[in-house]
Amino acid sequence: MDTIERIKQAVHSNPIVLFMKGTPQFPMCGFSSRTAQALKAVGAEFASVNVLEDPEVRANLPHYSNWPTFPQLFINGELIGGCDITLELYESGELERMVKEAKKA
C-alpha cells in the first residue's frame, strides 16, 4: 500500500485522528502536546499517527491535506487544522461539540 493510501486509510477508518510529532503520552513538540491535551480535555477518543516514526507520512501528508505543518487533526475524514485552530475550537466549546458528533457518526 502506498503512503497516500495509508494516510487515507487512517483518516477514514478513525472518526478522530491526530497526525502529530510523538504520541499523546509522549509528545515531541509543544504544538502536538497542546492539541492532544485539548482533545483529551473534551473526552475525545482518538487515533494518533507519530509522523516522526514514519518519514513517508511526514513527507506526504502535507500534499494530501494541503496543510504544511504538524499536528494535523482530522474529524470524520475532514481536516480541521493544526494546533491554533484546535485550541480556538476548544476555547469556544466547538471542539467538544465536534467530538460528540463524531462519536454519534
Image: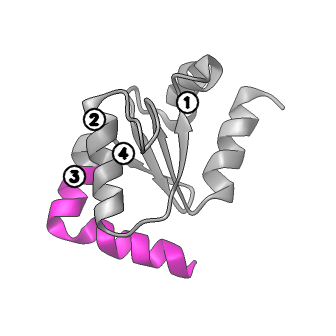
Between disc 4 and disc 2, whose residue precedes? 2
Please report contact status of discs 4 and 2: CB closer than 8 Å, yes or no: no
Between disc 4 and disc 1, whose residue precedes? 1
Q: Which residue is mark 4?
A: 81
The three-letter amino acid code for the residue at tag 1 is Leu
Kindly state the secondary structure of the residue where label 1 is placed: helix
- Outermost residue to the right: 1
Q: Which residue is mark 1?
A: 61
Q: Is residue 83 left or right of residue 81?
A: left
Query: Measured along the vertical axis of the image, is residue 60 above or below residue 84?
Result: above
Residue located at (22% from left, 61% from top): 90
Number of dots carrying numbers: 4
- Outermost residue to the left: 91
Q: Which residue is mark 3?
A: 87
Kindly state the secondary structure of the residue where label 4 is placed: strand
Between disc 3 and disc 2, whose residue precedes? 2
